[in-house]
Image (cartoon, rainbow, N blue to C red):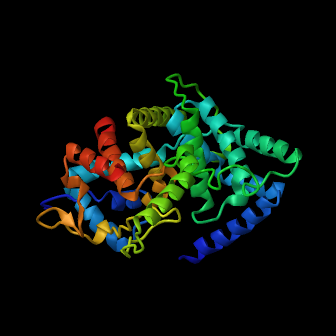
Amino acid sequence: MSTGCGFHADALAEHAAGRLDPDRRHRLEAHVADCEACRDALEVMRLVRAHPTPVPSGLESRIRRSVAERLADGPVESVRGSRARQHPAAGGGRGPGWRRWGMPLAAAAGLAVAWLGVTEVRDADPGPSDADGVATVDIDYEPYGAWPASDGMVAGEPLLGELTEEELEELLEEMES
Amino acid sequence: MAESVVATNVEEGALLERARRGDAAALDALIGRYHADVYRVAFRILGDPDAAQDAAQDSFMKALGGLAGFREESSFRTWLLRIAANTARSAGRRTTARREVPLDPAVERRGGPSPAREAVLRTEAERVDAALAALPEKQRLAVSLRLHQELTHREIAEVLDSTEGAVRVNYHLGIKRLRELLT
C-alpha cells in the first residue's frame, strides 16, 4: 500500500497515450490499482484524449483558398525586408513598448555607465538562457523513477500532489512573476 | 532521437524550404498537417467555432508572412501554434453560444459506432467539452495541448509564452479540477 502519492501526472499522461514501456507501465498500473487519486486522474486523461475538439468541415479548404489567393497577389513580403518584427509570433511577453523603448533605454544606460566611470562588469555566469536571453530552467523530471522523500521534495522540485491548491496558486504566482 | 522523428524533421525541413519559395503544394501539405491543431488551440481560447475558424485562417496567413523569418529554433508546429494562440487572444472574443458544426470526416477518429454508442459518445464529448470550458484558460490550454496535441510541457511553454514550471502546475491544477467535474 502506498504511503503517499507523487501524482505522477506525466507518467499518467504517457500511459493514457499508450507510450510507457512495459516495465514502467506495470509499475504505474500497480500504483494506480492502489491510488484512487491517480485512478481518477488516469480516467480523466483518457476521457479528454478520447474527445478532441471536432474540426469544422471545410476549414482546411477555406484556409487553402485564402493562402492561394494571397499567393496569386504576388510574392509574400519577407519579414526581414519589412517593418514587421522578426518574431511575429513572439507577441506574448514582449509588446511593442519593449521594442520601442529598448534602444533608447540601452543607449541611456550605456551613457550612464560611462559617466559613472564604471569600467568593469562583474562576470557572473547568468546560467542557461534562450535565444532572447531569457533565463531558462532545465528541469530534468522523471516521475517514473522518482520516489517521494520524507519532506516531499524530489531533486529540489516539490511533488505537486503534496501541495494544497493554495500552495499551488502561490507557486504559480512565483513562477509567473 | 528516433529514426522516424529524424526522418519527419528532415521531410518537414524540405517542405518548409519549398513553402518559403511559394510552392503551393508544400503550403497545402502544411495546412493539411496542422489546420486541425491550429483550430483547436484557437477554439480553446475563444470558445466559439466561428471565431476560431477566423483565427485559424488568420494564423496561417500570418505564418505565411513570417515564414521567411522563421529560424527553426523551435519546431514549425510549436511556432505555428504560438501564432494561433496569440492570434486567438488578440481576437479576444468569447461567446457562450455554441453551434453544432458538421465534423470534418478526415479528422474523425472513429469508424462508425452504433447509434446507441454514438449517443453515449456525443454526451461524453459534451461533458468533456463543458468541463474543459469551465477551467481557467491557462489550465484549459495546458491540458488540451498536452492531451490532445500531445505537446511536451516545454513545447506548451513555448506556445503560451510561459515557463515549463508554470505549465506543469497549470496542467496539474487542470487535471485536479477535471477530476472533480468528470468523475
Instruction: Give the x, y percent position of residue A56.
Output: 64, 36
Q: Residue at x 60, y 35 (%)?
A: B52
Q: Nearer the viewer, residue B170 or A84?
A: A84
Q: In screen coordinates, is A14 left or right of A156?
A: right
Q: In screen coordinates, is A137 left or right of B49?
A: left
Instruction: Give the x, y percent position of residue A80.
Output: 73, 58
In what quadrant of the picture does the N terminus of chain A appear? bottom left
Q: In screen coordinates, is A86 left or right of A164?
A: right
The reply to whether residue B25 is visible in this rendering is: yes
Q: Nearer the viewer, residue A119 or B154?
A: A119
Q: Nearer the viewer, residue B103 or A161?
A: A161
Q: In screen coordinates, is A20 left or right of A96?
A: left
Q: In the image, is residue B119 above or below residue B85? A: above
Q: Residue at x 76, y 65 (%)?
A: B17
Q: Residue at x 59, y 56 (%)?
A: B79
Instruction: Give the x, y percent position of residue A7.
Output: 26, 56
Picture quadrant where residue B85 is located? top right
Instruction: Give the x, y percent position of residue A65.
Output: 80, 41
